[in-house]
Amino acid sequence: MKRSLVSLLAVCAFAFSVGLLRADETCSSPYLARIDGQEEFVYVWTLGVEGLGDGNDKLVTIDVKPGSPNYGKVVSTTSVDGRNEAHHAGFTDDRHQLWLAGLDTSRIFIFDVYSDPAKPKFVKTIDKFAETTGGAMGPHGAYPLPGRMLIPCLSNAKDKGGKTALVEYSNDGNYIATHWLPTKDDAGGAANADLADGYGYDARVLPRKNALLTSSFTGWNNYMRNLGELMGDSEAMKHFGSTMVMWDFHTRQPKKIFQVPGAPLEIRWAWDPKHNYAFTASALTSKLWLVYADDKGEWQAKDVAPIGEAKGGVLPVDISLSADDKTLFVASFLDGKCRVFDVSDPQKPKQIYEKQIGKQVNMVSQSWDGKRLYLTSSLLAKWDKAGADNEQFLRAYAWDGKELKPQFDLDFTALKLGRAHQMLFGSSKLGPNRVVASN
Amino acid sequence: MRATLRAVSLAFAFVVASAIGTARETFSRDADHDYDAPTPGSYRLPVIKVAPDGAVLDSNGKGERLRDVFRGRVTVLSFIYTRCAAPKACPYATGVLSQLHRASLEDTELAKNLRLVSLSFDPEYDTPQRLATYAEGVNGESAGCEWRFATTKSHGELDSILKGYDQAVDRRSNPNDPQGPLYHILRVFLIDREGRIRNIYSSGTLDPRLVIADVKTLLLETTKLSKQ
């Protein structure tokens, strides 16, 4: 009798895992409630442009329901207060709220996306971030953990350089803790302390290994400066991150520092329960890096493939790993291309396709079933290209395993919206999180 | 009718008990939790917020306040409903609480200082009587740490508690869904002796080794303070 009940539970677990075959984005936190079925909306956190529309940063909602009369159209926009250098964003783990971070003003705008996913409603702003967190500034995004948000930052209020921290807030917006990235003087007991630079960018968790991995970029002094000027300033160009840090996730203590030169940015952990590795791309050196557990279970980092010709001006900025861990999409800002790599062997990625997306491209988001990709154009207000090269768009594509086929194209300048930055998927149908679904 | 309800309750409790029976008997690493647990006291658990209060009913139907329930011990609070059959949701959470309870049978520090609370968010079905039956099914031990089962008198009282704990609960579109009629985010809370939330667990972090390390970290904190 007991055995038959155990079998019943196993059947239930299998039925649960079948849900994995449905669509959702692949770059989200494993703690995030998943979308049940295909995404219905794409939310775009958009930088305001002076003289364009109301000039403010805004949350733009696009209907992507197949068959909808509004498919590919903007169905709502909600402006926030002023221009804040809108950058990344994240849902709370229950997917009820969307937190939108501003890199310049260090303000975080919280929206309710649950009551009416087609029309997100502004709830409140988290202000006085630097004062509250003990000096962290430049909240880069918001990464859902159980009941709380992990906010990796880029800078600090003291010198506005790259020394920075991970900050935690509860889902209801109460400050919890600040964890400073390891430095040579205070490496927190991490191995390879001599490499520590204190810089931060992304933060991602692999729950079954209790692993938190962070990457590194640059501080306010650099990211708020004109890119052309910055690249001509050899001293300023020295102030970019060249490390990644593996943390004990539960204790939030740094364990090992890796040398990853050239600003390693987005981190994508593999999804398969036996794949103990993550990819990142180093922006300035234009390489794919792999952080992986070796045969002894030790975490290591190594570069595994070039991304185009770095000297030609590539600047890979965002990456998206497919749910089956076989395909990696890489968006490169300077050449405006999306490259596709076969990463079935993570140690030996092979480029299999590339497509010119626009004059500039930044973010790439993929549906869970890998059939739809969405790309946006803006990197940073002062880093975006000028004149005719300053295209601002959301472009949607279908991916059939061989090529990207255009689906719709929204011109954010013609629509008087602004600079299109990060995308997140919304839906009225939610299910369990990925940790549940993967078991 | 009443006999039928009792049979259904026992059946669900038996499913949970079966899940517990298949869970790890010893707290070692496994494929889902492939890491070593930290040493208690080697890390900090920052205060998240004061644990919200609310009116509940114990499994005897007696009314009490959550703030009184939490008093004096470190509490592990799990939101559940007994009709849940999603293997990685309530049955898993109750299974982990059962493991914690079993650990307390052999650990006097836990037996004296830990309290487990399973609080239902399905008051229409999970009456005190049904919870008592459920409790009988999942915890037959009288020794070890406290393990209380509670529900609420009505949705009015429940809703303010769920809001306070940011515990999302929705009805599934199919009320006959084999996983149960409610969809919810798995949330388990660690509450210190002063009634403050110090950790929030969900799938992936609800590892009995981590919870015990956290409980003992809070107990060491209390010890350190009392020595100052």
Image (tube, rainbow, N blue to C red):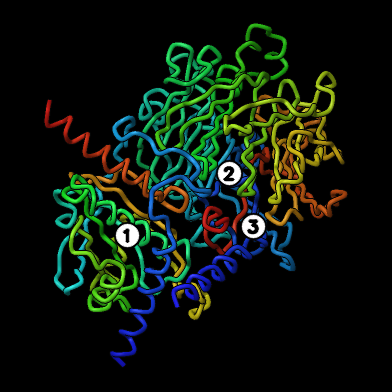
Amino acid type assigned to the residue bearing label 2 in the image: Lys
Judge the density around disc 2: few (<14), some (14-19), many (≥20) Cα neighbours within 10 Å: many
Chain letter for mark 3, please.
A
Q: Residue at x 21, y 39 (%)?
A: B219
Q: CA distance from mark 1 to mark 3?
A: 41 Å
- Quarter in which the C terminus of chain A is drawn: bottom right
Q: CA distance from mark 2 to mark 1?
A: 48 Å
Q: Residue at x 72, y 44 (%)?
A: A412
Residue B59, given in percent of the width and then of the height, sits at 20, 71
Residue beneath disc 3: A41
Chain letter for mark 1, please.
B
**Residue lying farthest to the bottom in this orientation:** B1
Judge the density around disc 3: few (<14), some (14-19), many (≥20) Cα neighbours within 10 Å: many
Q: Is residue A134 left or right of residue B55?
A: right
Quarter of the figure with residue A118: bottom right
Q: CA distance from mark 2 to mark 3?
A: 16 Å
Residue beneath disc 2: A58
Same chain for marks 1 and 3? no
Q: Is residue A318 left or right of residue A167?
A: right
Amino acid type assigned to the residue bearing label 1 in the image: Ser
Task: Mark 2 or mark 3: name the one nearer the start of the chain.
Answer: 3
- Observer-side mark, 1 or 3, equals 1
Secondary structure beneath label 2: strand
Same chain for marks 2 and 1? no
Residue B24, given in percent of the width and then of the height, sits at 42, 55
Q: Does residue A228 show up?
A: yes
